[in-house]
Amino acid sequence: MATEIVVGIDFGTTYSGVSWAINGGEKKIHIVNDWPNPNASVANSDKVASKISYQNWKAKNWGFNVELKEQSLSWFKLLLDPNNKIGQGSDKVVDTLRQLEALNKAPEDVSVDYLSKLWQYTKDKISKVRGEDWTDIYTVRAVLTVPAIWSDSAKDRTLRIAKRAGIPDNVSLVSEPEAAALAVLREKKEEGEPLRIGDCFVVCDAGGGTVDLISYKISSLEPFQVEECAMGAGDLCGSVYLDQAFERYIRLIVGESQWKQLKPKSKQKMMLDFENSIKRSYAGDDKQFTVDLQGVEDNASVGIDDETITLKSNALKTIFDHVIGQILRLVENQVAEVEEKGNHVKAILLVGGFGTNRYLYKQLNHAYQTVRVLQATGGSENSVKVLCKVDFAIDRAKLWAEKSFKDPATGQKWRTALFDFGIRLDDTTLDFFVTYKGEEVASVAANYMEEF
C-alpha cells in the first residue's frame, strides 16, 4: 500500500502553483486549479497570484482574494536572495521594500505568511479527496521550486521558510527551469521524440516576473536523467513587464487626468482582458485587437469608441519587441556558453506561462533557424505537474564557474571555483559535498591561489 504523498509547490514571483500525487500505483497527479477567487474569469487557473494583504499588521487575504483597496504585497520572493542583483532598483521591488518597511516585516516573514496560506489550502484540497485523516495515513514529501541562479544561502533560507510555514521537514528543492525542462522532455519522449544521451537543450523559462535560462545534457534515458552543461542566468523581463508597458500606453492615449478618474475595477478588468487574450495570442501580425475600458470618453483620433479601445498594431509590436528583445539576448548568451564548452544545442525549450506566447515562439524560431524550438503544450501547468515526479535526478557538471580576482589588501591573485568535489582512490571514494540532514544539497565553493 502506498504510504507517501508528494506535494509540488511552484512558488513564483507573480504566480504560484500546487500539485500532489500518491507515490504508488498509477501516480495520478492532481493539480490545484480551483482557487478561492471572487473573479470567475480566473477561478480555474492552474496558478494563483503570489500576493498577500495585511490588516493591523496581520495577514488577511491571499491570492486572488486580495482586493484592490487592500494593502497588499507581491514580488517578495525576489528579495529572499539579497545577493542576487536581479530586480534591484525596479519599480516593483522598490514598492515592495517600501511596504515591508511600513509593515515592519522582512521578506522572509511575508513569504512565511503566504506559503502558510497556500499550504493550508492545499491540505484542505487533499482532505476532500483522501479524507480528513490523510495526514495520519500518509507521510508527506514536498518539492519546492527555486530560481536556477539562486545562491545556496537563499536556498537554505527557502527551506527554513517552508518549515516555518508548516510544510513538513521532508522538503527538497528543484530549480524552476529544471522542473519545466523535465516536463517537456518527458512529454517529447512519450511522444516518440528521438532523444539520445549527450543531447543538449537550452531551457528558456519565461515566467511572470523573471526569465530563467539554463542548459541541460541528457545523461540517462532509463531512468530519465539530465545534468547541467552551462551556468544558469536570468533577468527581470517576464510577462508582467508587458502589462506595465501596456498600461503606460493606455494612460498615454487616454490622458493622465482621465485615467485617474476611472474606476479601479474598470482598469483591472481591462488588464485582465489584456492578460487572458492579447498577451497569449499576439503573434506579431496586423491582427486587430480591442479592449474595453468602462467610463472612458470617445476619442476617434486614438481609436476610442463606445468604451472600447482599438489597439494600433505598431504600438503592440513596440510593447512586445522591447521585452522579447531582452529574452532573445539571454538565449543568445546561453547558447554561446553551451557551444563554448564544445556542446551542440539540439533544441531550445520554451517553457513557463509567458513561454506559450506565439510571438516569442516565432521570434526564437526566426533567430535560430538551424536549432529546433520546442514549446511546452501545457504552459505553466506542466511545470507544476512535474514537481510530483519522484524518479528523476540531476547531477551538476564537475566545474561550472571560475572567476579570477585580486585581493585589494594583499595584492594576491585568487580564483573562485564552483564544482562537485570528490576524490576516487581505487575502490574507495572520499567525498566533499555539502549535506543537509543527510542529503546532498550543494557543491563546494573553494578559493585557491593562482600560483598553486
Image (cartoon, rainbow, N blue to C red):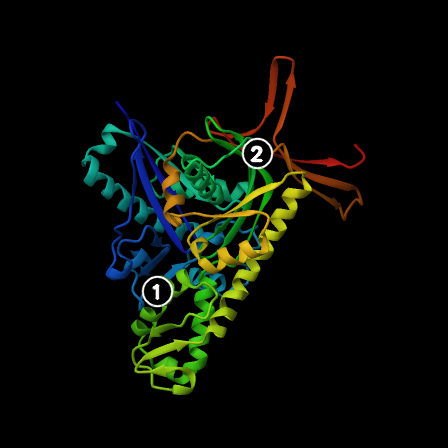
Q: Disc 1 marks which residue?
A: 71
Q: Residues within 10 Å of mark 1 (few under 14, many from 20)?
A: some
Q: Disc 2 marks which residue?
A: 396
Q: Position of residue 27 (x, y in %)?
A: 31, 32
Q: Is residue 432 left or right of residue 435?
A: right
Specify the quadrant that holds the C terminus.
Answer: top right
Query: Does residue 57 appear anywhere in the picture?
Result: no
Name the amino acid type tagged 2. Arg
Q: Position of residue 13 (x, y in %)?
A: 43, 54
Q: Is residue 302 left or right of residue 335?
A: left
Residue at the image point whose x is 28% and y is 49% from the top: 33
1 and 2 marks in contact (CB < 8 Å): no
Residue at the image point whose x is 34% and y is 39% from the top: 167
Q: Is residue 390 left or right of residue 430?
A: left
User: In this rendering, is residue 321 above or below 9?
Assistant: below
Depth check, front residue: 406 or 125: 125
Q: Position of residue 296 (x, y in %)?
A: 33, 82
